[in-house]
Image (cartoon, grey):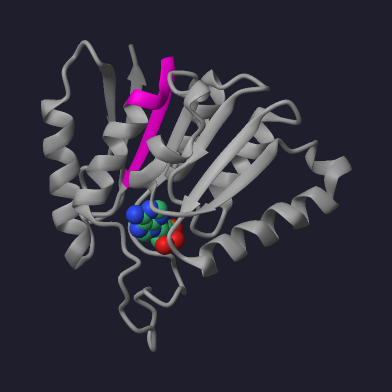
């Protein structure tokens, strides 16, 4: 059957430790798959903040949430979602101060929006919409500060494309320097597929 994908594994790790009613963050809304997953996980009493720098990504995410809400009785009720057209490196400034230290989960899915204007599909124009090392590391620092003790951050890293390789190296180095007292770190990776995405998970202490 094969092992679970990195994206499925990220969701499973989050679902296992995120009770209904939690406040959580999708740091890279993209197509909205994780935003919808988080909205389902936290349920009606919970709240999701989703960040993206691309209006196109937020529109796709909004559409996905609306579609799921319209199918409500099958899918279960969704938590309230706040979509923020802003970089995740600004999350500490944009998430209300009273929630700092109380966030249950932060999910990152790095790289570019497939099929988006910065995507790598034929005909796509490369744009500034790929996640970048400096802002990614700033956001990871902020995420750790916002998390509650026992909260989880997941980071899906894409080493298989040009800019992605540098970003993956930057995240690897950041994890290597992360003090053991701050968080427990997990790496989920397919070593025979070195160009495939891999997952870090951090549980804040
Ligand atoms: N690589 C994944 C999808 C990642 S989508 C896949 O293949 O399925 C990554 C999203 O991050 C994109 O929608 C992009 O617009 C967004 N992004 C880029 N820089 C960002 C930043 N600084 N803050 C928040 N989102 C950002």
Q: Nearer the viewer, residue 162 or 160?
A: 162
Residue at image position (33%, 26%) is 144
- Main SS class of the magenta portion in the image: strand
For the question of whether residue 199 can be seen, the reply is: no
Q: Position of residue 13 (x, y in %)?
A: 47, 27
Reply above or below: 171 against 24: below
Q: How many marks?
A: 0
Reply above or below: 53 against 153: below
Q: Is residue 146 magenta?
A: yes
Q: Which quarter of the picture shows residue 89? A: top left
For the question of whether residue 140 can be seen, the reply is: yes
Q: Position of residue 64 (x, y in %)?
A: 67, 57
Residue lying farthest to the right in this orientation:
73
Asked if residue 121 lies left or right of residue 29, the reply is left
Residue at image position (45%, 23%) is 100
Quadrant the C terminus occupies: top left
Q: Position of residue 176 (x, y in %)?
A: 12, 29
Asked if residue 122 lies left or right of residue 196, the reply is right
Residue at image position (53%, 31%) is 24
Ligand 1 lies in quarter: bottom left
The span picked out in magenta is 145-156
Q: Position of residue 81 (x, y in %)?
A: 65, 43
Q: Which quarter of the picture shows residue 112? A: bottom left
Q: Nearer the viewer, residue 71 or 136?
A: 136
Residue at image position (34%, 24%) is 145
Asked if residue 136 lies left or right of residue 116, the reply is left
Reply above or below: 44 against 2: above
Reply above or below: 107 against 84: above
Q: Is residue 187 magenta?
A: no
């Amino acid at each position: 059957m094969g092992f679970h994908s990195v994206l499925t594994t990220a969701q499973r790790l989050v679902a296992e430790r995120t009770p209904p009613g939690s406040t959580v963050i999708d740091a890279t809304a993209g197509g909205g798959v994780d935003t919808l997953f988080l909205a389902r996980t936290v349920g009606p009493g919970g709240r999701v903040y989703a960040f993206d720098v691309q209006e196109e990504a937020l529109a796709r995410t909004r559409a996905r949430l609306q579609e799921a809400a319209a199918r409500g009785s099958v899918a279960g009720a969704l938590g309230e979602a706040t979509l923020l057209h802003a970089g995740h490196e600004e999350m500490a400034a944009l998430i209300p101060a009273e929630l700092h230290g109380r966030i249950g989960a932060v999910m990152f899915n790095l790289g570019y929006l497939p099929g988006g204007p910065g995507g790598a599909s034929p005909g796509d124009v490369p744009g500034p919409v790929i996640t970048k090392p400096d802002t990614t590391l700033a956001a990871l620092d902020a995420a750790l500060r916002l998390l509650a003790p026992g909260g989880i951050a997941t980071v899906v890293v894409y080493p298989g494309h040009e800019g992605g390789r540098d970003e993956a190296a930057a995240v690897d180095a950041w994890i290597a320097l992360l003090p053991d007292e701050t968080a427990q770190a997990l790496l989920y990776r397919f070593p025979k597929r070195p160009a495939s995405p891999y997952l870090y998970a951090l549980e804040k202490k």
